[in-house]
Amino acid sequence: METKKMTYMQALRLAMDEEMARDEKVILLGQDVGILGGAYGVTGDLYHKYGPDRIIDSPLAENAIVGFGIGAAMTGWRPIMEIMKMDFSMCALDPIVNHLAKYRYMSGGQIEKMPGVVRTAIGGGTRSGPHHSQSVYGLFAAFPGLKVVCASTPQDAKGLLKAAIRDDDPVFFCEEAAAYRIKGEVPVDPDFIVPIGKSRVVCQGDALTIAGFGTAVLKATKAAQMLREEGIDVELIDLRSLRPLDLDPVIASVRRTGKLLLVDEFTETFGITGEIAFQVTRDCFDVLKSPVERCTLPDTIIPAAPTMEDFVMLSPAKIADRAKKMIDKK
C-alpha cells in the first residue's frame, strides 16, 4: 500500500478532504474552520476548495454548532462539527448526549440515519492550562448511542476519521492536541479506513500486557522500547475506540502474560480505565497473577506552570518504571 509521510494534523485534513470530495453531503462547521483554516490549522485550505456552503464558520457557540449539525444530520447531511477543545464540549453536553445520541432511537424508525462527527482536541502537555487540557472522553463513552474514538498515530487519525464520517451513527472523535505535529506514514488510498471498534497490537511480548489509547500509547511505545533494551518484552495494545471497546486482544494477551497495566492521560478516579480493569478482571480472573494496575494522572487539575504540568503528565520513564515494578512482583 502506497504511503506518504505527514503529520497527524495533515492526516486529519486529508481524511476530510477525501470524504468531502467523495460525498457532497459532507459538511464542516465550527469556530474559524473556514477562512482561518481552523483554530489549530487542521482544516487548512479546505474553505478555498469547497466554499462557504460546505465549510461553515460559526460563532463561538458550541451549543449552536452541535444543534446546527443535528438538524443537518436529520435532513440527510453528514456534518463534521469542530469544537476547539474537549473542555468546551461541556457547553454542548445536552445536545450531544440527549439529542445527537438519542434521536435515531427515539424516532420510531422515522430517522433511519443519524450521521455526525464531533471533532475535538484533547489532552495536556501543550502548555494550555487547566481550561484547555482535559481528556474527559470517559464521560461521553458512558452514553449509549455515541461512538467514541481516540487516534494515537497519523495513520489512525486518517483511517478512523474517514470511518467516523461514513458511519450512520454519531461519533465523538478525540484528537490528541499534543500529537498534531507528530509525523508518520499514512496510506494515500482514498478508500483506506480503520474500522471503529478494532484494537491494534503495537508490539508483542510475554512479560506484561500494556493497553491504552491516544498519547498514552505513544509514550507507552517508547517505554516498551526502553524495556526491550533491558531484555524485557512487553505486549502493547492500542484500544483506539472507547465505545465500542474491543478487549478481545487484551484478554488474549493477558491470558498469556497474566498481568495488565492500563495507561491513560486522565485521572485514575472515575476514569475509563476502571471499567476496562473490571471487564478484564471478570474475564481473566483465573489467570491473573496480580491485580490489574493503572498508570494515569494524579487526581488533580492540569497545572498551568510547565514544570508542574510535566510532573503531572505521563512519560515513557514513568510507564517503564511502573511496568518493571509489576513484572518484579511474584
Image (tube, rainbow, N blue to C red):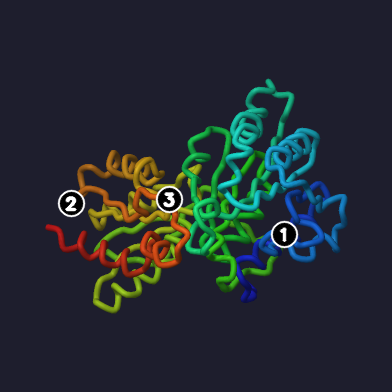
Q: Which mark is nearer the camera, 1 or 2? A: 1
- Viewed as shown, does residue 31 lie left or right of 330? right
Image point (62%, 76%), residue name: 5
Which amino acid type corresponds to the residue marked 2 in the rendered image? Answer: Lys
Q: Quadrant of residue 40?
A: bottom right
Does residue 76 lie above or below 56 as drawn?
above
Write down the residue under mark 2.
289
Query: In whole angstroms, how far apart are the C-alphas of marks 1 and 2?
Result: 48 Å
Write down the residue under mark 1.
38
Q: Which mark is nearer the camera, 2 or 3? A: 3
Does residue 253 lie above or below 183 as drawn?
above
Image point (33%, 52%), residue name: 252
Crowding near pointer 3: few (<14 within 10 Å), some, many (20+)? some
Crowding near pointer 2: few (<14 within 10 Å), some, many (20+)? some
Q: Extreme front residue here?
A: 305
Near-viewer residue (93 or 45):
93
Q: Extreme left residue here?
A: 330
Secondary structure type for disc 2? loop
Q: Pick the quarter of the image with the N terminus.
A: bottom right
- Viewed as shown, does residue 181 lie left or right of 282? right
Query: In whole angstroms, how far apart are the C-alphas of marks 2 and 3?
Result: 33 Å
Residue 25, percent from left and from top: 81, 46
Pointers 1 and 2 in contact (C-beta within 8 Å): no
Write down the residue under mark 3.
301
Image point (55%, 54%), residue name: 132
Pointers 2 and 3 in contact (C-beta within 8 Å): no
